[in-house]
Amino acid sequence: MIPDKSHKIAIGLSGGVDSSVAALLLKRAGYDLFALFMQNWHDTTGTLHGDCEWEEDRVIAEMVAKKLDIPFHFVDLSDIYRKRVVDYMFSEYEKGRTPNPDVLCNREVKFDAFLKRALELGADFVATGHYCRKDHFRDASGNTIYRILAGRDPGKDQSYFLCQLDQQQLSRALFPIGDLLKSEVRELAREAELPTAEKKDSQGICFVGKVDLPQFLQQKLKPREGDVVEIFREYYDSLPKPNSFEELSTPVSYTPSQGKVIGRHQGAHYYTVGQRKGLNIGGHKEPIFIISIDIETNTIYVGEGQSHPGLYRPALKILPEEVHWIRTDLALKVGEELECDIRIRYRQPLQKGRLVCRQEGLYVLFDKPQRGITPGQFAVWYAPDGEMLGSGIINS
């Protein structure tokens, strides 16, 4: 939905080039526009640069607002961010799961707390610099249905990070750069002489920055030394073939007696399935990868090589309470199935598969086994036209 010029729009100005160009486009289109910058983090513990990145971002965002001649507002949402995003991160890592804070930030902060603040300041819509597209239609009953579609730039599509938004949040959201390539965004910024034109893209955890993850997690999760056990390929020859959806989606379990202790680690909760770096264990021809984490025994299981069978699985399961449909009108009922495109991490190429809805949960079955299916991450499913239909937290 494109709002008419009588509506006021708040642009979430982050100090980066994407939100700056989003603001530029809205300003040029003649909208009543104001900028709103949010601070979400104070602590620099574990950050690799050791300074307050948000302070520089705020200065740059103010420069952009001044350049575009739009009002600038500031809001501190750090308490909400810590409670809803960072505390959730710590809780998930403590359980041996790997959360995605960027997805939570969009659901809980940008399109909730931040949106509410923008509405209080008189906005009708909130615009962001996400590379995705939105449209809408009316159903047979006259209800407006909002759709999220992949961004035009396949290398920058950020729809994955918005996979937990609902219809109410989408009704207020605008994504002005969704039809642009990143190169086009940079060129627009240069032409307009925006101070963000050559600024590098941010990296790391949303609003925290690039971190040394174990050091960051040590704020709440203490080191706990344990064994690293290597599982050899021959072990899988003796495993029975799965014959149900539940068995297909259940990861292989291990015990130390099934492998060989090859090293020590500082805490299983600091690591994630599929991880290669951080164990500092040599003596192998090929890199070793984490294939499983046992929080109860504080054991990390690894396998050698990219093709190690422990890295690959044909299916995953999402519990009923963790299934989220953006398109609630298309939500599967128990017993129904859906052929769709799926991704289990940002930037992963879409994978063919199907959803199978059962009483005990939603099963995601892939046409080809997937590498590094990680509990705590989000599985996201798309229609053939690139519309994102829903998502869920991977349970197993």
Image: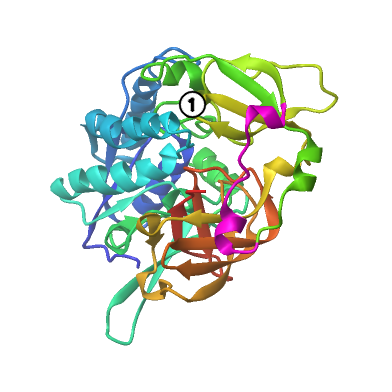
Asked whether, in this view, residue 375 is left or right of residue 240, the answer is: left
| Residue 314 location, quadrant | bottom right
Q: Is residue 277 visible?
A: no
Q: Nearer the viewer, residue 317 or 198?
A: 317
Badge 1 amino acid: His
75 magenta-colored: no
| Residue 44 location, quadrant | top left
Q: Nearer the viewer, residue 68 or 2?
A: 2
User: Percent from the top left, x then y, of residue 339?
Assistant: 58, 72
244 magenta-colored: yes
Asked whether, in this view, residue 303 is left or right of residue 15, the answer is: right
Q: Nearer the viewer, residue 72 or 357?
A: 357
User: Percent from the top left, x then y, of residue 333?
Assistant: 41, 74
Residue, x 34% and y 17% (percent of image)? 43
Asked whether, in this view, residue 21 is left or right of residue 106, the answer is: right
Report the span colored magenta.
Answer: 243-259
Residue reaching furthest to the bottom: 140
Q: Nearer the viewer, residue 354 or 165?
A: 354
Element carrying mark 1: helix
Q: Is residue 75 above or below residue 212?
A: below
Q: Quadrant of the N terminus?
A: bottom left
The residue labelled by disc 1 is 269
User: Percent from the top left, x then y, of residue 170?
Assistant: 33, 60
Q: Is residue 337 visible?
A: yes
Q: Is residue 235 above or below residue 379?
A: above
Asked whether, in this view, residue 33 is left or right of residue 365, the answer is: left
Residue, x 29% and y 33% (percent of image)? 81
CA neighbours of label 1 inside 10 A, class few (<14), some (14 to 19), many (20+): many
User: How many numbered discs?
Assistant: 1
